[in-house]
Structure formats: C-alpha cells, structure tokens
Amino acid sequence: MERLFRWTFRIVVFVLVATGVMLGTLFWFTSRSLPDYDRTLKVTGIDSPVEIVRNTHNIPHIFGETDADVFFGLGYAHAQDRLWQMTLMRRTAQGRLSEIFGAETLRTDELLRRLGLYRSANRAARLQDSETLAMLEAYSAGVNARINVINEGAEGRGAPEFFLFPPEIAPWRPADSIAVMKLMALQLSSHASEESARARALLVLSEERLRDLHPDIPGDGTAVLAGDLFPTLDHTRFAAAGPRPPLWPIAPRGLAGASNAFAVGPDHAASGGALMANDPHLGLTAPTIWYLARLDLRTGGVIGGTIPGMPVVLAGRSDVLGWGLTTAYLDDQDVVIEELNPEDPTEYRTPGGWTEFETEGSIIRIKDETPVTLTLRRTRNGPVLTGSQFDLGQVTPPGHVAALQWTALTEADTSMRTGLELMRARSIEDGLAAARHLVAPAQMLTLASEDRIAMVMMGAQPDRDPAHQSQGRIPAPGWIDANVWSGTKPFDDNPVWIDPESGMLGNTNNKIVDRPFPDHVSFHWGDTQRVQRMEELLSRRDIHTRQSLIEAQLDTVSFAARALLPLVGRDLWFTGEAAPPGTPERRRQDALALLAAWNGEMSEHLPEPLIYAAWMRALQDRLIRDDLGPLADEYSRMIPLFVERVFRDIDGASAWCDVIQSVPVETCTDVARLSLDDALQSLEDQYGGSPESWRWGDAHEAHHDHPVLGDIPFLGAVVNIRQSTSGGDHTLQRGRTSGEAPTPFANVHAGTYRGVYDFADPESSVFITSTGQSGHPLSRHYDDLGVLWRRGEYIPMTLDPDLARAGAVGITVLEPL
C-alpha cells in the first residue's frame, strides 16, 4: 500500500511538473511576440526618423517629417499589434484560407475566387492617383519593416497564432490594402442576400403576403431631423440555408453593416461649436476590427478609428473637421440569371445571341489534401456564382446560372482616395469633394466643422433602366437589356444635405429619400426603429451638449417595444380572473404585469427585456412557421414592421395569425397568448425561478469571439471575451442578437467604435472601441478598452504633440538604415 502511494505521488508530481514546464514554455514562446514599445530600431523604407508614441491605452501617436513617413509608421504600428488579423483578412480576400485551415474553409475560398475580389484589387492598385499610391506604398513598407524586425530578431513570429499555423508572411502590397477595403464592402453589402431571400419566400407566398414579410419602408425618408419571372422554378423545392463555413464573409441576413451618426449645428450647441457623434456597428470579434491612432500629417493632425490593413482614419476628426460613417444601404448589387445554351454550356444568352463565358482556371491548395481546380466564369454582367452562394441554387432554374452585378468589382475603384482626402480636408467643402471618389462600400458621410454640418451619400449608384423587370428586388433575366446596368450615375445624383435650417442631421441606416425607381437609392433599408428614437431624443431639446449626444449614443430604450407591446397584448392586459400560483395562467399574468409597468428600456439588469424579446421571437415564429416551413429559420429575428402589419391587419396581413394546417380559425389574440406561453416556458426551462429573477444581461452577453481560436477548447476561454450588455436589436445602443440556438439573444453585432466630437473644444472629444488595441491575448491591451466600452465610458485622445509625449508609456523610434 505504501509503495502504491509513493508511486502515485511520484506520477502526480511528474504530471504537474511536466504540465507546468509545458505551460511555461508555451507562455515563453507566445510572450515573445508581445512587442516592446520602448525601443529604437534601424529599418529600411524611410529617409528620416519616425516616432510612434504610445499612450496609456496603447494608442499610437505617429510623427514623421513627411506624410509618407507617417503612413510608414501606421503600417508598422498595425503590424506590431494586429499582424495576424491583417494577414487573415488578406488570405480571406485572396481565397487562400484552405492552405492553412484545410477543407473546412474550401467553400469560403471558392466564393472569394469566383467573386474575384483580389483580382479586382490588383487591377485597381494600378489605377490609383499618384498621392494615393504613395500612401499605400509607404504603408506597405511600414508593415514589411515590422515583418523584417520579427524575422531578424526572432520575436515570436509576430503573433501567437503563427505558432499554430504556417509562420511565413508574404510582403504587404498596396493591392492588399485595397483588397481589405473590398472585403469590408462584401461584409457590409446585403442586397444580393436580400434578393435571394425575397425570391425564395416568393416560392411559397403570394405577393401580398411577401409585402408583409419584406415590407417597403413607409414615409418620406429621414436625414434632416425636426411577380414571378421564372415560372419553371419548383415552388415546393426549398430548404433552410445550410450552415455557414468558417470565416464566411457574407453576413447573415440582418447582420450586415449598421451605424448611427448625429450632427448638431452651432446654433443648437451649448458650446457654440458644432457637435457630432458616430458609432459604426459591426460584428463583434476579439480583437475588434477597429484600431485607434493619431497621425501627424502635413495638413494637420488626425485622430480616430483605423482598420488594420488600411492606411486611413475612416472615422474621426482633425482640428477643424470631423467625419463619421454609416452604412447607406444603397442597392449596389443585382443578381441576374443567365440562360445556358442547351447545345453548348460554354455559352450564355445575350440580346445579340449566344456568347462564350470568360473563363479562367484557379487552383485552391488545401492543407493535407489534393488541390481543387476551379473554372471561374464571367458574363457581361459579372462573375458566375454557384448555387450554394447567397443560397441562389433554390432560385436558379435548371439550365441557368446566376451572376452578380456589384459596383465593388469595378477595376476603377478609387475608394482609398476618399480616405486620404478626408484626412487632409480642412472644410466641409473639402470633405464633400473627397466623397466623390468612393465606389464601395456605399456609406452615409456625416461632416461637422466648428460652424457647419453636412451629410452626403457616397458610393457608386447603379444606373438601372426604368423598365427593369424586378427593379432589383429579386433576380432577373440577364439576357434582357432592361435588366442590365448601363453604368453608374454621376455623383451629383447622390443625396446631400448641407447646413439644414433645423440645425440637426442624423442617420441610423434608415430610409433617407422617397424617390420613385430607378432613383430610389434602395427598397431595402437597415433600420425602421432606431430612427424614431433618434428623432425623439434630438428633437426634444433645442440645445445640445457633448453629453446629450453621448446619452443618445448609449440610449437603450426600444421604440419597437414601446410600439408593439400595447398592440400585440391589447386583448391580454388585465383580463381574466386571478390564477393560482404556479399555473401557466398566473405566470402569464405576472409577466404581463411586469411588461405593463416597463418603459421599454433594454437594461441588462431587468427581466422585462428578456420576456419581451422571447415573446416577440416566439410570436413571429408562430406567425410564419406554418407558411414558410424550414425557410422560417432564416427569419429568426423579429421584424417590427411585419408584426405591426399583422396586428393592425394592414392589407389583410392578419391572415398570418390563422394556422393553415388547423381546422379552427385562430385569431391574433390566440397567437399572442400562445406565443407568450411558449416564451415563458422556454425562459423558465433555461433560467428557472420566477420572472422577477431573470436578467436580460444573462441572455444578452456580448460575444467577442476570436474568429479562428474561439471554438478550440481551453483556448476559447482565453481568447474570447464575454460581457453582460444592455441594448437590443432596435435600440440606439445597438446590440443585435444572434437569432440562433442555443443563444438566440447573444449580442453579436454592436457599435464597435464610438466617437463624440465637440468643435468648440476639439480636445474634449472622446473615443472608445469594443475590445483593445492589441490582438495578443497575453497583452493587457487585449481587452482593456472593452471594459470601458461595456460600461458606456470613453477615453480622451489628443492632437497636442506635447501632451502625447508627456503621457507616453512607450516610444518606438524608427531610424533609416
């Protein structure tokens, strides 16, 4: 027995020591890639010294004798903190993920190869003006200088992820930065997905009921505040969309780009200078896509949010001008259906007869497997896609293929020039002129200077024929000239607002104009609810302050909840006799009593937001499940306008309340009651106890997940960030829910950058991002800003060089070799 004990003790000690040595070794290797921010280095690519001054939040303030030196410094800083993120985005755009991840990313690579994003980025790089190209080249040189330092100094391969995947890093090129912007355009564009979804819904719905589920947005538009084309399709042949492969760049429906921007003129600002707030909404990741930086350009300092891989401050301010971005929802994509020649499938139909596809071979190398050879095809309308992409297979008739028209695929893409000119802009006019060069992604650009405000839609508008058969709502025949773009419209056709009489401007991805097709901008918009709350908050007071814009940016009151609950529950409130404790009737009465006293605030500390969200989710599912079948899974987030149409019986929409398969005729009150019972039972199963003990924050955790390591056991616990959050799908402090089991209310899409600027005192402006500056999980800057972001706090950032140096916690000096 004693011998057994001794050997057991020895084995346990050995295992513990071996584990400790292994963990210690792992920590040593991974910590080698933590950059030393306080050092002097000799590098190639510059003619004079560059200073990168880091403040306490690890935000680089970059100084150099020329703009090229400053862009070099930004490239170096990006590569210090986000090299893995940059190379991953580049690989995604190139369609080369499978080389390191294997067959699981093959579908993602195939999509990017067929779209040809990197091909068009390469061609666009050759067409940049001299100053934009000089910026891109200097930035690339800075990235490559950091890669050389890593290789020569054996500094942990630059990021811990490179210990798990091939460490070789190709030099950065100007085309890579353009490709990153195009990848962002793909993630922010949603119209091809919307067309496909509408077409699939039309397979099982009448046009009247389709208008309920995909309603046209009512109203004139807000900026200034105060039929079946392919009868051969099988209408019974469809299924829910399959699972998305890893690193799939097309956002699920409802999770494409979003944002808020507010601007208040000086006459309505307590400080006497214009105010502006901007918070772009993107998918939550660890680290966030944003990286704060300050650049000391010859035209003046600029500060704000950059995206690693691109050498521009996309949202921020200088000493005289602020600029903010919100996704415009311009309809810049059309799916066209091309007919194959039944005698020769290498040809497709055009108005002039059969024409050969443009074809090109492409080889995808796959880790540990045989390479796959693709034949890429293009028509006069754009690249040909497969049935699994945008779920087009279900809406493409036999003997046809689908192609994509998209403005971002143009070779004459000058979008990067807009970023450069915005950083150099010294007036509202300069900012508006800079907007002319942007092609994609289409954005609403909000501008503010000390005494003026403006807003303009920037991005190339397709020039559609008034006779277009589907008006871009669903895929249309590509062999009919009326369905093919005749180019893009002149920039002067883009909506613009300058110094409105009301003194206030705002955008929440809402409908901005009410124009007839083809001047309509879009039929599909990103918001119908936040805009109502924005107008209420900004119009309720005549004079605003920086703090009032912060309060609007962080507002968690749901206009949708306030509007829908009285409508959906109108025949349920305070009806019936008191029920015994523990019965479903009593549980329903208790929940309704809570909701009756609730003001619609989606606070993480309250049970009411959870009850409301679960009720609306269950309600919509009951309304549509019998009509759509498996397709209902794609409508997993509540659509306020749909629920409103149903319960107001607009154009007979109450027909959704009757269950098709049942003999009785169900009323909307029946469905509302049953869905509330469904929701409460589900919440009780998951959270137990009484409704008073539930918390919205327990269900609405922010999921900042590492896109590669997040699903790996143990590593996920290290690299993923979880935070209880307020807000919801339709609040200004947006916290878009996943809609997917087992965490349908998880916060997966939010304001990942927030900035508020006061041009009476520009140095009082504040900023925050959703995680931290570093992409290294062992860095204290991996999630330090996220703690503040979750609490609704901000940090100051200065354009004063002396203040930046006085508060420096590290200075990297790059000297010419």
Image: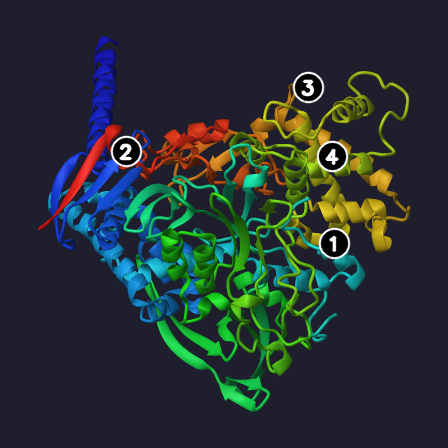
Q: Is residue 280 left or right of residue 177?
A: right
Q: What whole-number distance in Å separates the C-alpha atoms at marks 2 and 4?
A: 46 Å
Q: Residue at x 54, y 46 (%)?
A: 259
Q: Earlier in the sequence, mark 2 or mark 4?
A: 4
Q: Amino acid at mark 1?
A: Pro
Q: Element at badge 2?
A: helix
Q: What whole-number distance in Å separates the C-alpha atoms at marks 4 and 1?
A: 19 Å
Q: What whole-number distance in Å separates the C-alpha atoms at marks 2 and 3?
A: 49 Å
Residue 717, image quadrant: top left
Q: Residue at x 56, y 57 (%)?
A: 190
At label 4, counting other C-alpha atoms closer than 10 Å, the crowd grade (few under 14, some 14-19, many 20 or more) is some
The residue that label 1 is drawn on is 218
Q: Is residue 306 above or below residue 11?
A: below
x then y, percent, for residue 602: 63, 30
Q: Give the camera-side residue of 678 and 325.
A: 325
Q: Residue at x 69, y 27 (%)?
A: 608
Quadrant where the N terminus sits is: top left
- Give yes or no for contact between labels 2 and 4 (Cβ–Cβ under 8 Å): no
Q: Which mark lies nearer to you, 2 or 4?
A: 2
At label 1, counting other C-alpha atoms closer than 10 Å, the crowd grade (few under 14, some 14-19, many 20 or more) is few
The residue that label 4 is drawn on is 562
Q: Amino acid at mark 3?
A: Glu
Q: Which mark lies nearer to you, 4 or 1?
A: 1
Q: Is residue 525 above or below residue 680?
A: below
x then y, percent, for residue 91: 34, 57
Q: What whole-number distance in Å separates the C-alpha atoms at marks 1 and 3?
A: 37 Å
Q: Is residue 34 above or below residue 581?
A: below
Q: Amino acid at mark 4?
A: Arg
Q: What whole-number distance in Å separates the C-alpha atoms at marks 2 and 1?
A: 49 Å
Q: Residue at x 81, y 48 (%)?
A: 646
Kindly tell me whether residue 588 is visible in this rendering.
Answer: yes
The residue that label 3 is drawn on is 692
